[in-house]
Image (cartoon, rainbow, N blue to C red):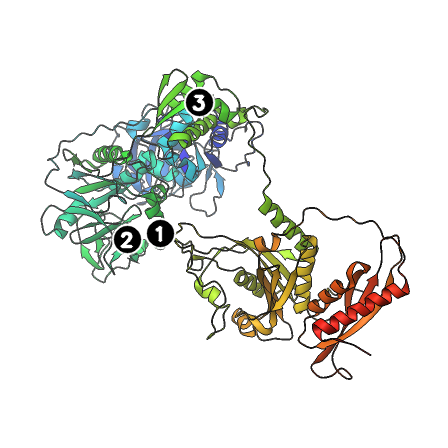
Amino acid sequence: MKVPISWLRDYVDIHLSVEELAERLTLAGLEVGSIRYIGIPQGEPPEGMVIPPSDHLVWDREKLVLGAIREVRAHPNADRLVLALVDYGGSELEQCVTGAPNLFEYKDQGPLDPPLLAPFAHEGAEVIDGHAEGGARMILEERKLRGIPNRSMVCSEKELGISDDHEGILLLDWDTFHPFAPGTPLQDVLGDAVLDIDILPNVARAYSIVGVAREVAALTGEKLRLPSFEVQMDGDPIEGRAAIEIREPELNPRFCAALIQDIEIRPSPQWMQHRLRLAGMRPINNVVDATNYVMLELGQPLHAFDYDILVERAGGNPPTIITRLPQPGEKLTTLDGVEHDLEAFNLLVADTAGGLSIAGVMGGLESEVQDAFAEPLEAMGIPLADNDDPETLPHGKASVRRPSTENVLLEAANWEFINVRRTMQSQKMNSEAGIRFSRGVHPSLALTGLLRCAEVMRQISGGRVAQGVLDVYPLPAETVRVELPYHEIDRLLGFTIPRAEIVRILRALEFEVEEVGDVLHVTAPDTRVDIGTGLTGQADLVEEIARIYGYDRIPNTVIADMLPPQRNNTSLEREERARDALVKAGLREIVTYRLTTPEREALLTPAGQKSDWPDAPYVTLANPISADKSVMRHTLLAGLLEVAAANARHTTRQRLFEIGNIYLPQNGQPLPDEPVHLGILLTGPRDVPGWQGQPDTGVMDFFDLKGVIEALLGDLRIEGKVRFEPTEHSSFHPGRVAQLKIGRRTVGVLGEVHPLVRQAYGFGLDLARPILAAELDLAALTADIQTLRDIAAVPAQPGIYQDIALVVDADVPAAEVHRVILEAGGDQLESATLFDVYQGDPIPAGKKSLAYALIYRAPDRTLTDKEVAKTHEKIARAAQKRLGATLRA
């Protein structure tokens, strides 16, 4: 939000420099992103604050001054030029030759009383060339213009660097600026600075000039001056001339309206246009500008309807303003000429004939204020019909001739902020009103904003305000009261602020404070919607106290409160150990969105097959941020495949993992189950190419994935009955998929991704480069983590190394053979390692040979050959008995 310092000073005295003020506001939570200087030099920033140097035009105090145009005469040699006689505080008037179109109406009228006040530049002054692009500057030098010498000029806003307006010279409002004598340095008259403040949602109450002034008053100890809310009501009573009907009070807790009669549409006063431009808004006309001015001033958006159009739509009867939800298929064309297909939750301001505006966001085109001198419609992006002229304004989809608005029904309402936010998102709309309503505006501002705007509109349009206002308030906001003990302030802050300062800060922020012993009874002002009740309210108030006191003034202290009990976060510790183990194994962690769509996860199941993923409804977002993020995910595998598919355009080798929640609704429970899963994906070459020209070891396959999981289990010290058992799964290649079991628990599934699934995710059907994936339940995986490791001494006795080759049926898992060998070998067998698998001649068909390297060792003695032979024979007999194995010759 752009905040001109000159406007801010209307409500609070400021004795700080612009830079010091910016620092104080930033430290209080209103971050000043930049400062725009207008005519004045940039000051020195406070210590520790960095402000980029500005290259703006600084007005010379001697050569750029306030001038008073006493007379405008015709140029003897040019119809498009005039001679302005300017009083600049010197002994004689200075004659300026100018082509400013806004001076022609004063030509040859003799001495002007009062004179026209305008910026005046002496010879040698530096100004911006109004006829050049890019802000090029020039130094005034004397030269003749159509035979008349000219050495000075009266200036436009563009020539002064205020704006890009060069349609005429800047004529200042006499009532505002006549106290300044001619010759006063222009810096003292129009010199200004504009703070560009980032208003975050937690300080949305400051989204106005008065809101910022309230913060400044609290920070500096100055008194806040509010504008007057008195209204001169001398029109006919409003009663019986309009009505209000609220059908959705939860979405529209308050609606106020006033009637201003007999207005004259014309440009706003120069002072208002100047302030609007500084605040970043384009002046339109006096009625629209009044609503924008009060919105910027107080933070209450307003909207002006052409009352006569409303009466016409009501068949000549008093109109009834209705706030309601749209009917199925209803559409509305807004002020920007865009037709909107309305969603079911898009609240409307309507009448008995149809929609008038999208509540809290933007008005409708049909009932807008009609402006006879408005810009041509082509400039607004609205095409003219062949028989239209610039005074023709659109009515619905047709163009009809209408006179300027004479009577205005002024709206000031309050809207539920979340619904406004949803509406802006669904309709892809953005407006100053919508930004404010979407962050929260207190209902009390509706009436004060209405009264303020009605009076401003009356003063600048010449209209009469009807007696009384319409105020429908079905859901009054509750008054927030908080009991705040002094000791709680000390406890939360960790240091002590003097009690008198605490009370001053709260009252400066317009809280009502009553001291009862050691407890403050605080009532929140009706400008605040962010103060809670109970303990939350106490924390909110303490935050306000600390913020205004100054975060930079908080001392370094040792915590004085009792420390909470320290407990280990076991699940997080186990999760971190799993991460470390996978990174150690050469994998890279990714983090994908937890939000997805059912259609994207449906790609995990080939068409026509039954899915093996959880058969449960999705957790659906009521207000998704985009169409592709509408539900909470059921699996990590879909996100892994999407990331790998995107990466495949740049790399052939990927070793990825993700640890994150999935979301499964629970019957009868308001919140879903959120188990933490581990997803792994491998694809591409097994080894990274090196400069030594290592031999190609092929691409990763199922056993690389199995090895990663075994390494993970080893690092986590998971000891027990770990088994990889063949299974089937809809997302994996038949015959190349297994389930991991630890004891009786099924931990998850791993294998090669199904060819149709990989094709659905954009990998194609290159089966020579398989995609390996796993999805495991991390809680089930880490349930048996051993925190202590058994320590064994380095063997003191020699080992005896022997091999054994067993021929077993081809479908017997090697893990089962390994288990039998270890059990039969007993304490004498230290280890058994598979080093060869063979099928083919002379091994019979349907059989395979598994060769193991065995190490025999006793801790207390050297084993004899006889002892080893006996154990070796025992292993062979056990394998033959339990597995039908035979020794390979």
Q: Is residue 452 left or right of residue 121?
A: left
Residue found at x 30% / y 31%:
173
| The N terminus, quarter of image | top left
Q: Could you say whether the residue bearing mark 3 is in a helix, strand or loop?
A: helix
> Which residue type does callout 1 highlight?
Met
> Which residue type does callout 2 highlight?
Thr
> Does 833 appear above or below 113?
below
Q: Could you say whether the residue bearing mark 1 is in a helix, strand or loop?
A: loop
Q: Which of 800 and 679 is in front in this view?
A: 800
- Residue tagged by mark 1? 429
- Residue tagged by mark 2? 334
**Does residue 479 appear in the picture of this structure?**
yes
Q: Which of 744 and 415 is in front in this view?
A: 744
Residue 408: percent from left, percent from top: 19, 42
Q: Earlier in the sequence, mark 1 or mark 3?
A: 3
Distance from label 2 to label 3 (Cα)? 43 Å
Residue 603: percent from left, percent from top: 49, 68
> Which residue type does callout 3 highlight?
Thr
Residue found at x 52% / y 38%:
55
Q: Are marks 2 and 1 in contact (CB under 8 Å)?
A: yes
Q: In this view, does 75 lie to the left or right of 566?
A: left
Q: Which of marks 2 and 1 is in front?
A: 1
Q: How crowded is mark 2: few (under 14 residues within 10 Å), some or many (20 or more)?
A: many
- Residue tagged by mark 3? 220
Quarter of the image for residue 270 reads top left
Point out which mark residue 571 bears: none
Q: How crowded is mark 3: few (under 14 residues within 10 Å), some or many (20 or more)?
A: some
